[in-house]
Image: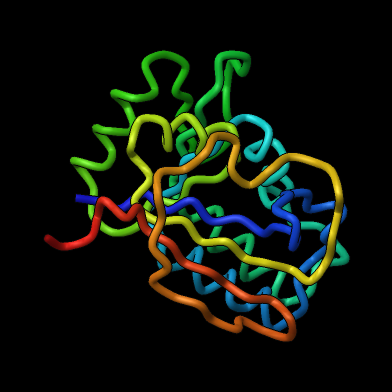
Amino acid sequence: MAKLVFAMNQSLDGYVDHREIGPPDPAAFRHFIEAVRGLTCMVYGRRIYEIMRYWDDDLPDWDADDHDFAAAWRSKHKWVVSRSLESVGPNATLIQNDFEEAIRGLKAQLSGEIDVAGPELAGSLTSLGLIDEYRLYVHPVVLGRGTPFFAVPPPPLRLVGNDLIAGNLVRLTYVPASNDPA
């Protein structure tokens, strides 16, 4: 059975906004390249999928790390949950109806880690009790506004890891406390 992991960059005050937080430093970017390489697949909400489509086509000003990330990202199948999209790009499948059944099916049929991206989608999956792990990549900035990492209150969580990824980027890893062994 696969594990659903909601992982996103966020500010100290809990907001996700890639434009405001800015790009990761080179060491952090290499961490994200390796993280994507290790995934089974990805599940995206519409907004984050549209942002990530940036990696579909090579750009002339990219460096080697950009090309490595794009190659890793393109190699992974993406499942896109959206009622408004009519189609998705390469190596992607659109889920328009009964996303709960579709995600439960992915968890049951696959093994490894499935990345969940998009706070609203993660909120819906949290409400359904489907998120197995939360990875908060905390940047030392305060935004004061934006989209919160947690779109809905999560269940009680237990910290299972804290890692300095690179520079000032810290990863906090939590699992639902109900996942504690009895």
Q: Is residue 102 left or right of residue 109?
A: right
* Total numbered labels: 0
Instruction: Check the image and report above or below for 76 versus 166.
Output: above
Nearest to the observer: residue 98 or residue 87: 98
Nearest to the observer: residue 102 or residue 16: 16
Image location of residue 125, percent across then percent down: 42, 34
Residue lying at 72% horizontally and 49% vertically, measured from the top left: 16
Q: Is residue 89 left or right of residue 28?
A: left
Image location of residue 28, percent across then percent down: 67, 77
Residue lying at 32% horizontally and 27% vertically, measured from the top left: 102
Nearest to the observer: residue 132 or residue 181: 181
Instruction: Check the image and report above or below for 62 versus 59.
Output: below
Image location of residue 75, percent across then percent down: 48, 55
Q: Is residue 154 left or right of residue 69?
A: left
Q: Is residue 7 left or right of residue 28?
A: left
Residue lying at 51% horizontally and 35% vertically, measured from the top left: 123
Residue lying at 47% horizontally and 40% vertically, measured from the top left: 43
Nearest to the observer: residue 168 or residue 33: 168
Image location of residue 99, percent across then percent down: 39, 23
Q: Quadrant of residue 165?
A: bottom right
